[in-house]
Amino acid sequence: MRDSLRGAREISDAELVEQACSGDDRAFSALVRKHHASAYRVALSITRRDDIAQDVVQDAFIKAFRALGGFRGDSSFRTWMMTVTANEARATLRKRGRWNESSIEVAGPLEASAPDPAEQAVAGQESSRARAMLDTLPEKQRLAISARIDEGLSFREIATLIGSSEGAARVNYFHGIRRLRELME
Amino acid sequence: MNEIDCAKVRDCLPGLASGRIENHQLVTIESHLLSCEDCQSELELIQMLRAAPPVVPFLLADQIESAVTSSRRPWNRSWWGLSAAAALVALAVGVGVSRDRPEVIQDVVFDFGVDPEQGELWLSEDSFLAGDLWIEGLSNETLMKLLAELEGEGAA
Ligand SMILES: [Zn+2]
């Protein structure tokens, strides 16, 4: 594995964070390599643009590195990093003036003017179509679904990520799944 | 163990799709799926989504590392970092700084060969030496000298 820098035993994130805090660049590099993919998927889920998502992830890691001393370890580093990235993504969208989602996104129907993802997806590729449909859901729903399905996060962790209660995280996930199933029919 | 409701099964479906379900739960869930079209359909959706994950750009990790490294170069440090560094120099060369009355620290300025007319340093409320404009005005060469001096002090 690329990440196993130092011998057979895999170093835990908590140890890597501690080492990175004391100036060990290799430890920070290991954290980047372990968690950049999750961070990117969060950024992409929120921004829905690859170029913006890449910028967001870079900025998020710069900020995370500066704030590493403040990381308390009461959540996993990955969840913390994903949350830093989510906040950075939202801030970036706000700066770009594209922040137009409602903060209450439990029952938001698709807008009539939304582009038809089915037409954009490759014909017959149901998986691509499902992903395209996922992108049409409100932010909290698609982020909850992506975090649960792609990253395997618990609802408690998803709650931190989307800035809600655990119950609201569940509602966002299950409502999003139901909506997606309707769209796929 | 025999009966399990849809809500519990649906909770487990992402774990099932990614192979993270314990064996003892697996049998119960799978037998439920055989008789429940609704849960089976949800599992298929989850499997579909998992089959087309977003592609992470190949060089992204390298780009992040470069970005973090650049952000840590001395000339990219924020002014307070340099001011705090300058405060250490002031202490190291024994310059008196009044908290109540802002005063120019000429000794420090002369130490680094900088024209004192360019700006001032003073101790701010948060105990940092302020004077970002003066710091900003320094050449890279002077900043490097200042930092080298500080690192020398820190290592001593
Ligand atoms: Zn069922």
Image: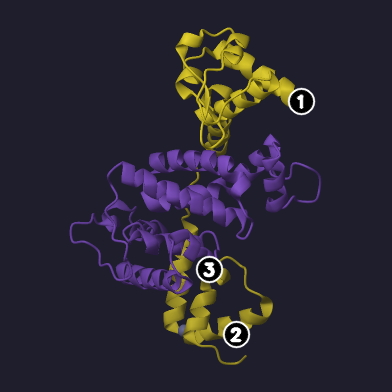
Chain colours: A purple, B yellow
Amino acid tagged 3: Arg
Looking at the rendered image, the quarter that the C terminus of chain B falls into is top right
Of residues A140 and A166, the one drawn nearer to the viewer in this rendering: A166
Q: Is residue A90 above or below residue B155?
A: below
Type of amino acid under label 2: Thr
User: Nearest the camera: A44 or B29?
Assistant: A44
Between B57 and A86, the one lying in front of the other is A86
Return the chain for callout 2. Answer: B
Q: Chain of mark 1?
A: B
Q: Position of residue B153 (x, y in %)?
A: 73, 22
Of the pair B12 and A138, the residue shown nearer to us: A138
The answer to which image quadrant residue A101 occupies is bottom left
Instruction: Provide the secondary structure element on which disc 3 rests.
Output: helix
Secondary structure beneath dot 2 equals helix
| Residue B155: mark in rendering | 1
Name the amino acid type tagged 1: Ala
Q: Is residue A182 above or below residue A4?
A: below
Q: Give the Cα distance between marks 3 and 1.
A: 45 Å
Q: Total marks drawn?
A: 3
Disc 3 packing (10 Å; few <14; some 14–19; many ≥20): some
Which residue carries the number 2 mark?
A: B28
Q: CA distance from mark 2 to mark 1?
A: 63 Å
Please name the residue that numbered disc 3 is placed on. A156
Front: mark 2 or 3 = 3
